[in-house]
Every structure is written in structure tokens, then in C-alpha cells.
Image (cartoon, rainbow, N blue to C red):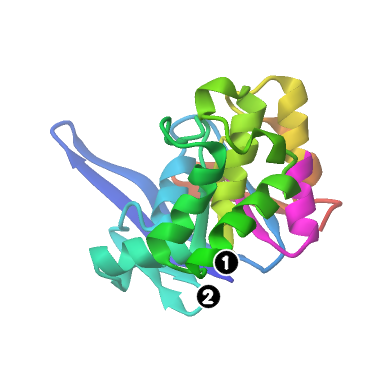
Amino acid sequence: MLALRSLSKRYDTPAGTFFALREVSLDVMPGELALIVGQSGSGKSTLLNVIAGIERPTSGEVWVGDTLVPSLSESAMALWRGRNVGIVFQFFQLLPTLTALENVMLPMDFCATWPRRERRSRGMALLERLGVADQAMKVPSTLSGGQQQRVAIARALANNPAVILADEPTGNLDSRNASLIYELFAGLVGDGQTVVMVTHDPVAVRIATRVIQIADGQVELQRETVNA
């Protein structure tokens, strides 16, 4: 599903050269929830951005399925990402002028992955699955943080992506809503979805199949959990 081979990301700054990632190699299998943990500045979010093609590696390979991601052009990358990767952010990133349903339909409109006549019903089905169908016609500012994140997860699922990348998805939520979001991710993995999640929250370990610890841009430790 996901394979990284000798992946490095270097930044050249006025203060000198900085490696956010150093020779990272790992595999994530279908139906796995891989949890990436580490201190701030360890390279966690950079790793997710490189997997998603938001940033390009300095060297190494990123394979998602049979696609060598860094080989894609910018235009091909945008289309590939829209169809194959669902991204969930800490601050939701919902468009404020669109309703919850319109936000979920947006990836389908952009990538034309579903016939136009089916997009609305699919969007509603996803909101129903995430427990927020009753909020479909509301704009994000009228929703709670937990509701907004559920809508964001529904949007990430819109095009039936190969992998979900979640960057601190509960970092802006209280403990109750965070627990609900973790339960949702556990349910997605139970249905066969592949998830790679970056988090500082040790509670997330209870839903992970594997924990990958990163320090100074390198994989320091990998271990399977009781959920594997």
C-alpha cells in the first residue's frame, strides 16, 4: 500500500543545511493504522507532507500502490492526490462559505470521480456514516469542533482514497471529542481503510496497529500494538 525507501528531505537555509528526514524506510500495509509519534520538530508532519506529495523529497522513493509519487508533475500530482489521498488536518480546513455537504462534495467535483448526479447522495451517505448528516446544510462556523472534524473526515473519504493521512486530527478538540474521533478512525480501519496518523496524544495508541517513533528525522523505533 505505502512504501518509503531511503527517504530524505533537506532544507538549505541561511543558517546552514537542515535535514527534516534522514534515510527513512518503512512500509504501511492495507487496513493498517500506523501512528507516527515524536517530539515537535522531529519530522512527523514533513513525512506526511512528502507522502501526500505536498512536498517533494530531496532523495529516496515514495510509493503509494504502484505510483512513484515524486515522479509526478505538479498537475498530475494534484489530480493523483485528490483521487488517492484523503487528508485530515488539525484545524479542519473546511471552506467557510460552503455548507458541510458542499465541503464533502468538493473533492468529487474537483476530480470528477463520481457522476454528478451521485455526488450529493454520496456526500449525504458519508455525513450519515460520520454521524453529522443533520448538520449537512450548515456552514462550518455554526458547527462544534468535533462536528467540523467529522465533516473533514467525511470529505477525506469522498473519493474513496487508498490512504488517509491525518495530521494531529484531535489537537484542536477536547478529550471527549478526541475519543469520538479515535473511535471513528478505528471503525474506518476495521472496514479496511488504511490510515497514517501523526499525533502527540498517547491515547491514540489504543487504536493503532503499529507505532512508529521518529526522532531527528529518522525512524527510531517501530512496534506493533495489541490491535495489530
Q: Left or right of 162: which side holds 205?
A: right
Most foreground residue, 32 or 152: 152
CB within 8 Å, label 1 to label 2: yes
Most foreground residue, 11 or 113: 113
Whole-percent x and y of residue 216?
45, 40
Residue found farthest to the front: 117
Q: Residues within 10 Å of mark 1 (few under 14, many from 20)?
A: many
- Report, in whole angstroms, how far the alpha carbon at label 1 lies from the one at label 2: 8 Å
- The residues colored magenta run 183-198
Residue type highlighted by circle 2: Gly
Q: Give me the disc on residue 69.
A: none
**Label whose residue precedes the other's in the sequence (1 or 2):** 2
Most foreground residue, 183 or 112: 112
Q: Residue at x 64, y 23 (%)?
A: 173
Residue located beneath label 1 in the image: 162
Q: Quadrant of the N terminus?
A: bottom right
Residue located beneath label 2 in the image: 65
Q: Is residue 3 shown in magenta?
A: no
Q: Is residue 185 shown in magenta?
A: yes
Q: Left or right of 92: which side holds 227?
A: right
Whole-percent x and y of residue 102?
50, 45
